[in-house]
Image (cartoon, rainbow, N blue to C red):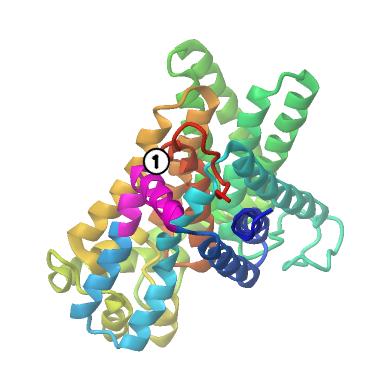
């Protein structure tokens, strides 16, 4: 085995490990990203560069990803923020530059399967730990709240676990529908049900609640839109299950009622989750003149927000980011920023529509989760959530890479 072939395969295996690491540890995931990129760079020669450029540029999600990264850099030149703060934003969005690299490495179906399996295994462990956490005090869990009616998030925060578990549920349904064995299909269905239950019954993530519901609705619509009677039956069953989950989960009831109360009674003097988001919308409406067409500049939001929100406790909650990625891009990168992130998501939708059955449904469910999460959180700005959406976008879109010429083997390096 040549050195270049060895480093290429090592980069792919490192990438597969990354898919098993990011739901657990940001630091480990960042280290594996760096190792993957270094190994990939060592495996390249002149011919590989041509293959890389052809594969990357032909993929419909690469152009908006690169455009967004470029726009973040350009918008930094009229930003009121200092360069140290701007550099922090570069670190947030640099992962968009890794999309073409990772797509190139995952051009082979079997390599993508390893990544799906790595993600699936770590989410299965998270799911088992979440349910076990109801009765047992697990040393690796971040919460120690035995019993029902409490948050049982295991790794990271409840928002991250909620959106990742939402995709895992759709993934299990997708696999169940493709299984030739009824027993394996049933097993995947049971795991999907347990995953949905863990989000609705065992966590306090309202983003997770919305993510699981909307992703399953989109999945069902994608699969059954030509069979309205069956779709109606599935919707009725889903409503019944959701109603049962609401009645059985004090956590679900409390968080839903709390959101309604916070929306009705919000003020700039009281820090609440929903109220803070409403105040951000008010702030954006009053300060759109700062953004203009091209935005106020990269990293400008925290600078301007700190001058507007005078209460230290309130500012600590919403001055770092506005809890809405679309608003953040619009405020800092203007209309071009908003247009590019929508282009990015539309590229995934268009690719999904080229597939059939549960493959299409899975991709559209992922976009539904991405839209929901970025409407309620600055998910592409936050470390764990941005890793999730960037890496899963790569996995969803890698199959769209233009095939290599006949006789070449994807992922291998000529001697």
Q: Would residue 369 appear left or right of 29 to someone viewing this image?
A: left
Q: Secondary structure at mark 1?
A: helix
Q: Residues within 10 Å of mark 1 (few under 14, many from 20)?
A: some
Magenta stretch, residue numbers: 46-66
Residue 323, picture quadrant: bottom left
Whether residue 171 can be seen here: yes
> Mark 1 highlights which residue?
348
Percent x, y of residue 211: 51, 46
Residue 364, picture quadrant: top left
Residue 124's place in the image compared with 270, above or below, is: above
In front of the other: 269 or 220: 220
In front of the other: 295 or 309: 295
For this orientation, the residue located farthest to the front is 415
What is the tally of numbered marks visible in this picture? 1
Dominant secondary-structure state across the stretch colored magenta: helix
Percent x, y of residue 299: 31, 77
Q: Which residue appears at 65% of the width and 40% of the height?
A: 245
For this orientation, the residue located farthest to the right is 136
Q: Which residue appears at 17% of the width and 68% of the height?
A: 288
Q: Which residue appears at 38% of the width and 51% of the height?
A: 50
Percent x, y of residue 62: 36, 50
Q: Is residue 396 magenta?
A: no
Residue 331's place in the image compared with 53, above or below, is: below
Q: Would residue 288 appear left or right of 121 to someone viewing this image?
A: left
Percent x, y of residue 341: 31, 53
Whether residue 256 can be seen here: no
In front of the other: 84 or 125: 84
């Amino acid at each position: 085995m040549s050195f270049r072939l060895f480093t290429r395969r090592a980069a792919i295996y490192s990438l597969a490990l990354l898919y098993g690491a990011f739901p657990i540890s940001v630091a480990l995931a960042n280290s594996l990203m760096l190792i993957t990129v270094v190994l990939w760079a060592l495996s390249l020669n002149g011919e590989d560069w041509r293959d890389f450029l052809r594969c990357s540029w032909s993929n419909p999600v690469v152009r908006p990803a690169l455009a967004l990264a470029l726009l973040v850099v350009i918008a930094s030149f009229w930003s009121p923020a200092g360069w140290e703060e701007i550099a922090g934003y570069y670190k947030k969005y640099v992962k968009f530059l890794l999309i073409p690299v990772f797509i190139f490495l995952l051009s082979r179906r079997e390599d993508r399967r390893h990544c799906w399996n790595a993600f699936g295994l770590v989410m299965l462990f998270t799911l088992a730990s979440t349910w076990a956490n109801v009765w047992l005090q697990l040393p690796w869990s971040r919460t120690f709240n035995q019993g029902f009616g409490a948050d049982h998030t295991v790794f990271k925060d409840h928002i991250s676990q909620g959106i990742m578990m939402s995709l895992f549920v759709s993934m299990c349904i997708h696999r169940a529908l493709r299984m030739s064995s009824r027993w394996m299909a049933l097993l995947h269905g049971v795991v999907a049900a347990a995953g949905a239950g863990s989000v609705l019954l065992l966590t306090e993530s309202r983003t997770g609640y919305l993510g699981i519901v909307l992703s399953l609705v989109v999945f069902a619509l994608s699969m059954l839109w030509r069979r309205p009677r069956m779709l109606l039956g599935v919707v009725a069953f889903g409503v019944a299950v959701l109603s049962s989950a609401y009645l059985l989960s004090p956590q679900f009831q409390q968080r839903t009622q709390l959101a309604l109360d916070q929306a009705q009674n919000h003020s700039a003097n009281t820090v609440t989750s929903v109220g803070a988001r409403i105040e951000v919308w008010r702030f954006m409406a009053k300060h759109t003149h700062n953004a203009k067409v091209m935005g106020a500049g990269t990293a400008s939001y925290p600078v301007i927000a700190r001058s507007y929100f005078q209460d230290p406790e309130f500012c600590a909650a919403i001055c770092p980011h506005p809890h809405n990625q679309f608003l953040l891009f619009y405020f800092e990168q203007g209309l071009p920023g908003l247009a590019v992130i929508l282009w990015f998501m539309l590229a995934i939708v268009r690719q999904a529509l080229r597939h059939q059955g549960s493959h299409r449904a899975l991709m559209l469910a992922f976009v539904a989760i991405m839209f929901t999460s970025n409407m309620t959180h600055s998910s592409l700005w936050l470390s764990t959530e941005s890793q999730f959406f960037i890496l899963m976008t790569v996995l969803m879109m890698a199959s769209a890479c233009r095939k290599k010429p006949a006789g070449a083997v994807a992922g291998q390096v000529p001697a």
